[in-house]
Amino acid sequence: MGEHDPNEEPIETVFRNGTITTVGILLAFSLGFITHWAANPIPWEIYHLVAVVPILIGIALQIRALRLLLDITSLQRRVYERANRIFIAGLIFTACGVGLAMLLDFYDLSTKSAVPGG
């Protein structure tokens, strides 16, 4: 990995544990959303990939951050900060994908529920 600076102030374990809890909870919400959306009665189309891909990338980044934070080396400030950056990137990807999914669902519902003029 890299050299450990012995003069570097370590992260407090209580603080790191709070971060692990936060990452775990938000990861669970992300996984829950993708599971719920996959069970959505609206049939999937190829254009749904514009929402699914960022969600899956975001989930993968969140899992990576959680893995880093669970390692004892995350008590080193540089490792901890790297895990946080990865987590935030994952959260942004997931949030963008969720937003796109909501827009796609809204679009699908609005086009299918339009009353034909007559």
Image: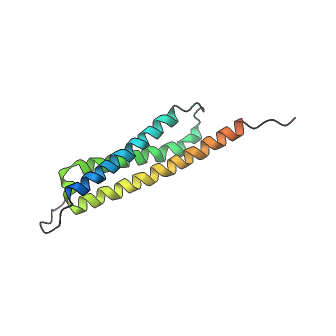
Q: If the image is split into quadrants, where does the C terminus sit?
A: top right
Determine if residue 108 is in view: yes
Comparing 20 with 80, the one in front is 20
Magenta stretch: residue 102 in it?
A: no
Query: For the point 42% across and 43% down, which residue is it?
Result: 29
Comparing 19 with 77, the one in front is 19
State left or right for residue 38 relative to residue 42: left
Above or below 103: residue 6 = below
Q: Position of residue 17 (x, y in %)?
A: 25, 51
Query: For the point 40% across and 45% down, which residue is it?
Result: 59
The range drawn in magenta is: 1-5
Comparing 13 with 42, the one in front is 13
- Residue 106 in which image quadrant: top right
State left or right for residue 54 relative to residue 24: right
Q: Position of residue 115 (x, y in %)?
A: 78, 36
Task: Please identify the residue farthest to the right as the structure is shown.
Answer: 118
Q: Position of residue 39 (x, y in %)?
A: 52, 31
Query: For the point 55% across and 44% down, which residue is it?
Result: 101
Above or below 80: residue 97 = above
Q: If the image is split into quadrants, where does the N terminus sit?
A: bottom left
Task: Please identify the residue farthest to the bottom as the structure is shown.
Answer: 7
Determine if residue 1 is in view: no
Q: Main secondary structure of the magenta part?
A: loop
State left or right for residue 100 relative to residue 28: right
Q: Position of residue 5 (x, y in %)?
A: 15, 66
Task: Please identify the residue farthest to the left as the structure is shown.
Answer: 6
Indicate the colouring scheme. rainbow
